Structures are given as structure tokens and as C-alpha cells.
Amino acid sequence: MTASKSSRARAARAAARASAAEGAHLLALAESLRASAGSDSNAYLVLNARYHATIYALARHATAAAILERLANRPVDLFFPQPFRSMPLTDWVDAHVEIALAIAAGDGEAAGAGMYEHMSHLIERLRGFESRGERPS
């Protein structure tokens, strides 16, 4: 299973399992991403890792959630600064909000499709760096 397909399954599972309060919390994280996207890339990267960790937690995938939460507590920008800075961070925000809205609404199909598109786009950008012989660091 590819990362995109795995993420799709986890987002759909999160939509099926999230309570109303958990969905609201995820949506609040997505809105925090929106607030930091235009001004603080380091805060954005930390919140991004927490956002994705929350989705895995809502899917009741404890191992993946723990790994992503640990990432949120490290300087993530040291690992992948270029993909996130080569386009405005605000370009990523709409996908986060759409996925959060779908999960909060219990719409597994929309959540999964949104996550698949989001992760596919990220993977495509990382491959672009690789194909040009650039290191995303």
C-alpha cells in the first residue's frame, strides 16, 4: 500500500470514528494552520505534524499518531524545508480544512479522497526535488 493510499484509508477511518468534539478539535487545528501559514513557517510545520498525528489518532492508529507527534516536537523544517517553502504555505491550508470538515462531518469518502490528493501532491513535489538532483534539506 502506498503512503497516499494508506493516508486515504486512515482519513476515512478517522471520519468513521471521530466524535463531534474530536472533529471540532481537528478543525480548530486546521484553522490554526491557516493562521500560521502566512507568517510563521516553523509554527506551521509543527502544527502540520500535529494535524496529521490527530487524524491518525482519530483513526485509532496509535503507532502512526505517536510517530507524527514526536515529529511535531522536532525541528521538522530541518528535514523538508524546500517543499514547504517553494510554494506559499497557504496553498496547503485549503486541503487541510477540507479534510477536517469531511472528518468532522463523518464523510469518510470525502476525507479519504481529500487526503489521497493532499499526500499525492506532497509526494509529487518531493519526487520533483529528487528528479532535479536536489536534496529537500
Image (cartoon, rainbow, N blue to C red):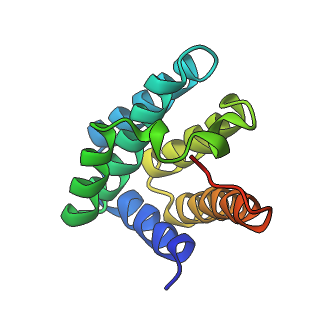
Q: Residue at x 52, y 42 (%)?
A: 101
Q: Residue at x 46, y 40 (%)?
A: 78
Front-lying residue, 95 or 111: 95
Query: Residue 47, how many percent across, how many down?
Result: 41, 32
Front-lying residue, 113 or 137: 137
Query: Residue 97, how many percent across, how many down?
Result: 57, 38
Extreme right residue here? 132
Q: Quadrant of residue 10?
A: bottom left
Looking at the rendered structure, the number of numbered marks drawn on it comes to 0
Q: Residue at x 67, y 34 (%)?
A: 85
Query: Residue 59, how many percent across, how many down?
Result: 31, 62
Extreme bottom residue here? 1
Answer above or below: position of 108 versus 98: below
Answer above or below: position of 133 versus 92: below
Answer above or below: position of 46 versus 128: above
Q: Quadrant of residue 34?
A: top right
Q: Is residue 126 left or right of residue 1?
A: right
Query: Residue 30, how many percent across, how many down?
Result: 49, 33
Q: Is residue 37 left or right of residue 130?
A: left
Q: Is residue 89 left or right of residue 58?
A: right
Q: Is residue 75 left or right of residue 30?
A: left
